[in-house]
Image: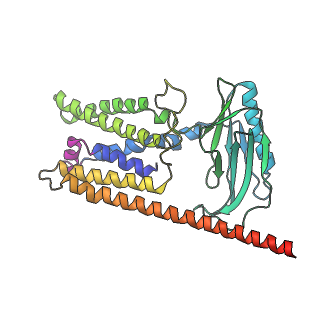
Amino acid sequence: MKGITHFVSGVAVASFFPEAVYLAADNLSQILVLGGIFGILPDTLDFKFARFFEGADVEIDPHPDHPDPQAMAETVAATIDRAHETGNTTSVQFHTVKLGADLWRLYSIFFDTEAGDVVVRMGSVVTTSQVPFPGSELDVPAGRAKTAARLIQTYDAETKVDIFSGPSMEFTPTRDGAIEIVFLPWHRRWSHSLTLSALFGVGMFLVGTALGWLGSPGDPATALGAGALWGLIAGLASVAHVVEDQLGHMGSNLFYPFTKKRTQGLKFVRSGDAIPNFLTVWTGLVIVLFNLDRFSAAPILDPVSYFAMSLVIPAALLLAGDWITKRWQGRKKRSEGALVAAEAVAFSEEVELA
């Protein structure tokens, strides 16, 4: 999920605590924001810190004017073979191809697990918004190199490299002699563990207790209550982040350091999909508004009608519209494909008659 999605989810978690709502309403406290901070914190730790401590064994940095997909494929295959032969994990950093201030050359890496091949294809020129320029593809054949190892793919078979900084991959030997392809090895490991969420909770319990004691010296009950509130909000907001990410494809290392690998996601959604992100943010805001009313002095919202009008009906209309759009686009693509096929048949018939 996107950062704003996790932030709103964290705020929604905090809004379930009456004491937090009272503090926000009566004392102008920012405690609801605490949930948002810990809701986004796991990704912040990864993208602002963890990724910069990663070192790659090999770097793929294509030439902007003369890229060599065959050499790129052979380099990746050789890196995989090294891991297979030595039994040690190897890694590759794929750099993007920047052509200008707002222009990039897209390329892709495909792992053909059945054939044991690495395939690299050069793509079109794209903008920073990832909009391709038609007809900008290079007339360069795809590169293909075979590996000696049996490949295990736990993420997408094809990875596209286009804008900003490129992805990295790790090739890890398994006990049965295969090589597991790990996408973004620095992401969703220790930072996305339930054990770290528990530590967040304990840490903020101590901070909240200390601040509560300073605000009400000689009143341990108030101090402990403040600590419990801070700890629960921080820990549960972080848990919400991990749970949301687990609905995707990559998964997370749920019990680091007791586990060493990411638990594969449920593959219900993708982190960048617009509809799941929008619906999650919308749901979070609906929940926050409901909780603010629920814990007010004079609640006015009826739960059934409120959630029906503000959540169920809009979500149903949005999902129905998305389904109709995708179905229409699918039919359009099929009709265009049929037209191309018909033109090809007609052309071949003309050639035979001639």
Q: Please count the marks in the image.
A: 0
The image shows residue 286 at horizontal and vertical percentages of 29, 54
Residue 51 on the magenta segment: no
Q: Residue furthest front?
A: 353
Residue for point 85% across, 71% down:
352
In the image, residue 169 above or below residue 161: above
Residue 24 shown left or right of residue 354 in the figure: left
Residue for point 42% across, 52% down:
4
- Residue 217 appears anywhere in the view: no
The quarter of the picture where residue 67 lies is bottom right
The image shows residue 347 at horizontal and vertical percentages of 79, 72
Q: Please provide the residue range marked out in magenta.
A: 15-28
The image shows residue 137 at horizontal and vertical percentages of 73, 62
The image shows residue 96 at horizontal and vertical percentages of 67, 52
Residue 19 on the magenta segment: yes
Residue for point 46% across, 28% down:
255
The quarter of the picture where residue 353 lies is bottom right
Q: Between 187 and 165, which is closer to the camera in this rendering? A: 187
Q: Residue furthest right?
A: 354
What colouring method underlies this structural image? rainbow
* Quadrant for the C terminus in the image: bottom right
Q: Between 195 and 344, which is closer to the camera in this rendering? A: 344
Residue for point 36% across, 58% down:
316
Q: Between 194 and 243, which is closer to the camera in this rendering? A: 243
The secondary structure making up most of the magenta span is helix
- Residue 349 appears anywhere in the view: yes
Residue 289 shown left or right of residue 77 in the figure: left
